[in-house]
């Protein structure tokens, strides 16, 4: 019998992204409730959309900080990006 995984709610918004090569606004989508994260190993995954140049630069930098509409700031680690795409994928933690 296959195990069904619980679908996490999508948390959408616009926020501020900061890394070595970029500081500015991006639109984001996070799978799960960011307010539920506590210090420790737990992480949520998400993506942000910006221009292809910005997405590539942030992906190359590898990590940064994302400030959500709520004012909460989270550390992010980049996971993936396709050349020419304005979407990049990340994991976030407190």
Image (spheres, rainbow, N blue to C red):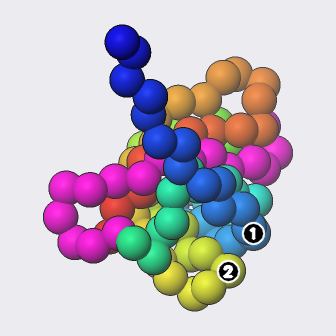
- Residue at left offset 34%, top offset 53%: 43
**Quadrant location of residue 21?**
bottom right
Q: Would you name the residue on which mark 1 appears?
A: 14
Nearest the viewer among 25 and 28 is 28
Given contact means CB atoms under 8 Å apart, are the residues at marks 1 and 2 in contact? yes
Nearest the viewer among 59 and 10 is 10
Extent of the magenta region: 37-52
Q: Name the quarter where the N terminus is drawn.
A: top left
**Residue 3 within the segment the image draws in magenta:** no
**Quadrant location of residue 27?**
bottom right
Q: Callout 2: 10 Å neighbours few (<14), some, many (20+)?
A: few
Q: Would you name the residue on which mark 2 appears?
A: 69
SS assignment at label 2 = loop
Pinpoint residue 24: horizontal percent, then vertical percent: 70, 69
Q: Name the quarter where the C terminus is drawn.
A: bottom left
Outermost bottom residue: 71
Between the residue at mark 1 and the residue at mark 2, the CA separation in whole angstroms equals 6 Å
Q: Callout 1: 10 Å neighbours few (<14), some, many (20+)?
A: some
Q: Is residue 85 visible?
A: yes
Outermost front residue: 1
Q: Which mark is residue 36?
A: none
């Amino acid at each position: 019998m296959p195990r069904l995984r619980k679908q996490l709610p999508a948390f959408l918004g616009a926020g501020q992204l900061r890394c070595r090569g970029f500081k500015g606004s991006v639109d984001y989508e996070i799978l799960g409730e960011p307010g539920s994260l506590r210090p420790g190993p737990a992480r949520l995954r998400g993506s942000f959309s910006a221009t292809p140049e910005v997405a590539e630069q942030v992906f190359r930098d590898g990590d940064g900080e994302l400030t959500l509409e709520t004012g909460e700031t989270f550390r992010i680690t980049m996971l993936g990006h396709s050349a020419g795409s304005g979407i990049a994928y990340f994991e976030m933690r407190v």
